[in-house]
Image: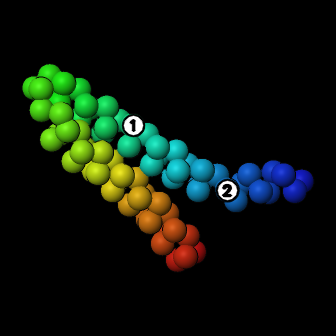
Amino acid sequence: MNFFQRILQKSAPIMSAVQSLFFYVIIFSLSGYYVDQKFDTFPFIFLPCLLIGIAFGFYQIYFLVNFKKKD
């Protein structure tokens, strides 16, 4: 394996966790925004959904870092 392939192999789990953080935030915030628009309650549902998405994403990164330390 060349140098570039080794770097990609080592960084793939972190890139996956960051991608999950991004998608959790997008999915939860869009769903909260949709519900808020439907019930005309913006930002009372959007903000908790956004915070839940951020929490899930960072939990995934935290789990990945702690799992890698055990190996």
Instruction: Report the residue at 43% width, 40% height from top.
Output: 23
Quadrant holding the C terminus = bottom right
C-alpha gap between disc 2 and disc 1 = 23 Å
Question: SS at mark 1?
Answer: helix
x%, y% of residue 65?
51, 68
On the image, the x and y values in percent for residue 61 come to: 47, 60
Task: Using the image, determine if residue 60 lies above or below residue 32.
Answer: below
Q: Nearer the viewer, residue 34 or 64?
A: 34
Quarter-of-image position of residue 3: bottom right
Q: Amino acid at mark 1?
A: Ile
Residue position for label 1? 26
Instruction: Tell me where residue 7 appears, x and y as whole percent.
Output: 77, 57
> Can you tell which quarter of the image residue 55 is in?
bottom left
Left or right of residue 10, residue 50 in this image: left
Which part of the image, by quadrant, shows the N terminus?
bottom right
Residue 70 higher or lower than 65, as above or below: below
Q: Residue at x 35, y 35 (%)?
A: 27
Residue positioned 21% across, 48% down in the render: 48
Residue 11, label in figure: 2
Which residue is pictured at 58% across the width and 56% down the height?
A: 14
Q: Residues within 10 Å of mark 1 (few under 14, many from 20)?
A: some
